[in-house]
Amino acid sequence: MPFDAWIALSVVIAVFPLMAFTRIGPDMVLLGALILLLTLGVIDSGEALAGFSNSGLFTVAFLYVLVTSIRDTGGIDLIIRFVLGRPRTQAGARARLLLPVAALSGFLNNTPVVATYIPAVLSWSRRLQIPSHRLLMPLSFASILGGTITLFGTSTNLVVHGLLVERYPTLAMGVFDIALVGVPVAVVGLAYLLFIGHRLLPQRRDAAQAFENPREYTIEMEVDPGGPLVDKTVEEAGLRHLQELFLVEIERDGNIVSVVGPGERLKAGDRLVFAGTSAAAVELQQIRGLVPSHHDGSSLEKDFKERRLVEAVVSDQCQFVGQRIRDGHFRTLYGAAVLAVCRGGERVAGNLGQVRLQPSDVLLLEARPPFIERHRQSRDFLLISQLNGAARPIHEKAWLAWSILLGVVGLATFGVMSMMNAAMLGALLVLVTGCCTVGAAKRGLDTQVLLTIAASFGLGAALESSGAAGTLAGMALELAGGNPWLLLLGTYVLVALLTELVTNNAAAVIVFPVVMASAESLGVSPMPYVVAVMFAASASFLTPIGYQTNLMVYGPGGYRFGDYLRVGGLLNLLVAVTALTLIPLFWAF
């Protein structure tokens, strides 16, 4: 291989462990690799920036705006209310949940679909007395399966199709072309989840159960009207720097002071709510002027317009991962107080301030109402769901947002205009009609995904232009013995393994030029391999880290790492067998 090829290959190989085993975001890893390759002269500026002008990337970006409009108008919430209902059996409940989710995910990015469903499923499961852990993992898997039905189903499908059209303009696919394989794959996968998969899950305790009794993690005291603390600030009263407790809120005359600051003055009869362990109550009882609260119910069980109780799932990109809650100044940055932490279905006991946050931890937060909108799109949290005082979504424009999306699908399906053009027109219409504000549209863009995709193009270009892709293709052909079916199998397995460790987009885009070079060397059609890359990149059922929706349900469902292997292992095999059997039938070598 030429020297440039060795450099390109070394950089690409280094990228995968960095994405898989460090907290550096995949977008930053890939952009860093791209800059290195550009600096070393392996690629030129045109190749480095090619990904930022790819039609697939822009189609994904415009579809994010469309999905935001449907979420903000309550379009997904409306469907949830309509389809969940009151099933008579657990089998009926699973069917009402999984089938609509798979159908929705064929046209919408599955991350907002799952994010909207999780809070609804948690309350629905409590009402039906069905353990939520038997529903949440199947919910994520069903959304992944649904994404394989259309080109719109996942960003990976659109990006791989964009690469295909750039390389072979005459091989452009229709929106529903992959449904020939996607529908059977989804049917097989959903049948497994409906009748077998849920039985493989052991009993788990979810985050809602861990948080259900506020008296386990809060202590309530009152300011003695005749005591020395009246009219003193929180700081002056010595309540700011307690060892194992911190003051969360003050209930005063039927109102609430949330996320209490050090300058807040205490009044006679104030009801103070502290987060911490019951063992730490001794520290409070030694403070003159505080007496145990005489109220029966917990203050946290009441609804106040000034505060919200929120569950937030910590992302692996959260800046506080690995830091202690007290040291990280969590409260100062987010304007929210941590009441409790749930990990693996169990509330983390002990001194709350000393807890070091980990990815997928579920935090019970007390925050002011603006917190939810302000941080809903934050990369620090995978999911933010409100536990009390939830406002009912406005549904007046939901039909319009859905109509625009269906119009986009129709225009692209019947070839009236390209997918990118249709998505662009749809994004413009939802903004003009007020289904989505410009601010919401900006927040709805997942810049990390978009940057990851764009940078991945540069790495793929480096492998191709340097000659590394050709060399790797020769090795692949040698391993496959010149057999196109074995090459198809190897392509699927390689992409499926990589997508469990890194993002599905990066796995697909980087492997794509190698696979195309292999098909060209073999003298066969590239189409079976293109479709195999699409399906393998979505087949992420073995770990919680391979796909964002898997990570989103990990904490709320109280799952453990092995649960994904137990349920997802057989599902991965079923999907692989179904896809690899059908792909050569519809796209011959």
Image (cartoon, helix red, strand yellow):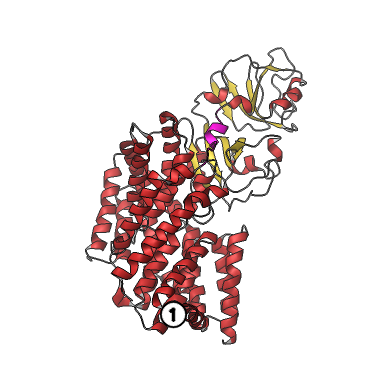
Three-letter residue code for mark 1? Ser
Relative to 494, residue 294 above or below: above
The extreme top residue here reads 226
**Is residue 313 placed above or below 299 in the rendered structure?**
below
Residue at (49, 74) in percent of width and height: 460
| SS for callout 1 | helix
- Counting from the top left corner in percent of width and height, residue 125 is at 43, 34
Q: Residue at x 55, y 67 (%)?
A: 30
Residue bearing the label numbered 1: 518
Is residue 536 visible to us here? yes
The answer to if 11 sits in the magenta stretch is no
- The picture places residue 83, in percent across and down from the top left corner, at 31, 38
Residue drawn at 42 percent across, 77 percent down: 516
Q: Magenta stretch?
A: 202-212
Picture quadrant where residue 423 is located:
bottom left
Q: Quadrant of the N terminus?
A: bottom right
* Residue 440 appears in view: no
Q: Considering depth in this image, is 160 or 491 the residue closer to the camera?
A: 491
* Image quarter in which the C terminus is found: bottom left
Magenta-colored segment: predominant secondary structure: loop
310 or 234: nearer the viewer = 310
Q: How many marks?
A: 1
Report x, y in % for residue 81: 34, 36
